[in-house]
Image: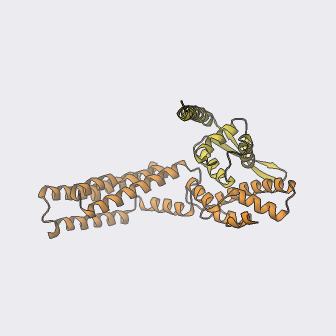
Chain colours: A yellow, B orange
Amino acid sequence: MNFKGGLTTLILQNLNRGPNHGYRIAQDIKQKSKGVLDFKEGTLYPALHGLENKGLIESYTQEENGRTRCYYKLTRKGTKALAEQREEWTRFAGAFTLALQET
Amino acid sequence: MNWLKKNEVDNLWDWLEIATKGLLPADKRRITQEIETHCAEAMKAHLDQGESGQVAEAMAVVELGDPKAAGKSLRKKHLTEKDVKRLDWTKKDAGSFPSLLVTYAISAFYCYIFGSGSFAKEPKLDLIVAKTAVFVIGIILPTITFLIVRTFWFRRRITALLLVKSLGSGDFGLILWLWIFPISSIGIFFVTVWILGIISGVRFWNKVRKSKDDKSGVPTPV
């Protein structure tokens, strides 16, 4: 399912649970949605870098098994943005469900 | 395997080459490192599922998607080599005396055109407004901008400099052309060019403002 606009919200939600790296974020989103929310993993990094530019997340590097891994974590601004986006999405989804009801 | 044929590239190096094309060396390095680590993890997962090394790599690359699309998105988030050149040019051009003289010369040319016979049919008031607007756009505004951007504060702040340059005389130009050529095709052409110029300038300013890349224009050593 294509969900281009919602990817940033899902990234923020994932990082709300704690710092994470690109590959794990992608796998978590796919697993949590039971494969319904599938996306090309190359699109994840521009989205992450965009969120970083906006100051919603921060990155830091860490050495792991001889590899330098880039981790991302949510900032205070990001937490606030997530709350707003979640509320907006809940309102939108509720309205959509109501509109689809056959009564 | 048919699914492999659909993808343009089946190895990570080609994918990275396309996706990071035009980016600054520091960003290229960072993105390459991130994607390499990502792919290594993906390959390991496929190897654990019993795939061969070659297939595991190809599958990991396919999962990354179209490198051109990824590259397009990355170039929106990061400054490119072209952007740095544009920034460098903006810094050099703003506050440059020869550049100011060129603007004066263009304004004089426009004034000459408006004074020529081809505009004889235009109402006198329109021509007075046109000449006044050219004087404001071509002489007063560039002179003020020239003096402002030569100040220490502006020379240290590239984003402020870009915004001044982007908006610059664009709004005045729009008013001028709407006044003189309200419905003619030349009027529409100039208005379109001016609007596109302003949009392009403001978009570039916004990109530079948001980007965390080095805006000094000094290339980072590879």
Q: Quadrant of the N terminus of chain B?
A: bottom right
- Report if residue B135 is visible in the image: no
x and y percentages locating residue A70 in the rendered image: 73, 49
Would residue A35 appear left or right of B99 to someone viewing this image?
A: right
Q: Does residue A59 lie above or below B17 as drawn?
A: above
Q: Residue at x 40, y 62 (%)?
A: B96
- Report if residue B136 is visible in the image: yes
Residue lying furthest bottom in this view? B117
Q: Quadrant of residue A19?
A: top right
Q: Quadrant of residue B51?
A: bottom right
Q: Quadrant of residue B64?
A: bottom right
Residue lying furthest top in this view? A103
x and y percentages locating residue A61 in the rendered image: 74, 48
Give the camera-side residue of B172 and B104.
Answer: B172
Q: Residue at x 71, y 41 (%)?
A: A33
Q: Does residue A6 lie above or below B148 as drawn?
A: above
Q: Residue at x 40, y 51 (%)?
A: B164
